[in-house]
Amino acid sequence: MQFEIVTDSSCNLNDAMIREFGLHILPLTFMSDGEQYQSYTAGRDSDLKSFFKMMRDGKVFTTSLPNLQQSEETFEGILSQGKDLLYIGFSSGLSGTYQASAALLEELKKRYPDRKIYYTDTLAAAMGEGLIVYKAVKLAQEGASIEDVHAWVEENKLKVAHWFTVDDLMFLFRGGRVSRTSAWAGTLLNIKPVLHVDDEGHLIPMEKVRGRKKSIQALVDHMEQSGTQPIADQEVFISHGDCQEDIDYLVKLIKERFGCTKFEINILDPVIGAHAGPGTIALFFFADKR
């Protein structure tokens, strides 16, 4: 590639893919009991299962933006080597990460006027953001210019559908997504919400179903209703809150209904997982619209 791609740990791509693509990752941070952690550390394998074990054991986490000094060092390290830079960022509807990074890049444009610096708000989350980054890297590897890759991301980001369900509504309550009353009532009645990320990058409740399997089936129903045809040819991306048995069921349904064979699956990034909780399932695919 003639330029470098930077993204956030919220893209949720696995370690092997990050290394293969040569991606630069800005790690978001999360905290518990006065300790601060980073969602991603270069050169170290991520231990995402242990994060969800801690949540199941009762640990409560809060989240924060990437360290701005570290972000600036990452950006400037690329630019100072005479390379151009494309930053593909986490939804501004869910985090201030993109705005903070864009402000840094505007300052760096003044310091490096001869470098091409582009950035885009994906309005996406988890492996929805990861799917956009994945496609951008593939285009760059095929020889597309930084201008063409940036344009593709802008033209296609609202075609990446995000469909979520969670297993425990109390985590959404703690994150301010549902009321305490809704969370308790939903828990008692075994109600599982189905949510999506809208065109403004916000996580929006869409419907309620009773029971875990029906909520997973609802994700596949939405894929059938809006997925870009032929769905069988799609590369399907899935993030989850350490619930492999449920993911096996989801993959089985998708294979049986559409014939898909290409899947990228990873345990959910801690910064998003802290709000959604263990048992979260998120399905991402290209669609006519979100």
Image (tube, grey):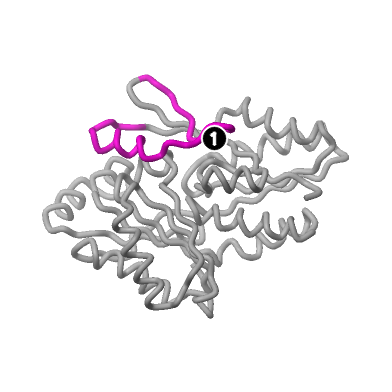
Q: Is residue 76 magenta?
A: no
Single out the residue that lies furthest toward the right. Answer: 114
Residue 68, given in percent of the width and then of the height, sits at 60, 28
Q: Residues within 10 Å of mark 1 (few under 14, many from 20)?
A: many
Question: Total label count?
Answer: 1
Residue for badge 1: 27
What's the magenta region?
34-61
Tell me: 213 left or right of 154. Answer: left
Residue 238 in which image quadrant: bottom left
Return the residue nearer the eye: 131 or 175.
131
The x, y position of residue 127, in whole percent, is 49, 53
Residue depicted at x 53% and y 32%:
44
Q: Was residue 57 drawn as part of the magenta stretch in this picture?
A: yes
Q: Residue furthest left?
A: 188
Indicate whether 156 appears above or below 230: above
Mark 1, secondary structure of its residue = loop
In terms of depth relative to the viewer, which is nearer, 135 or 148? 135
The residue located at (42%, 34%) in the rendering is 63
Nearer to me, 187 or 223: 223
Q: Residue at x 59, y 61 (%)?
A: 157
The amino acid pointed to by label 1 is: Pro
Give me the residue at 27% from left, 64% from top: 215
Residue 53: x %, y % from top left: 29, 37
255 vs 97, left or right, is left
42 up-or-down from 247: above or below: above
Q: Residue 203 falls in which quadrant of the image?
A: bottom left
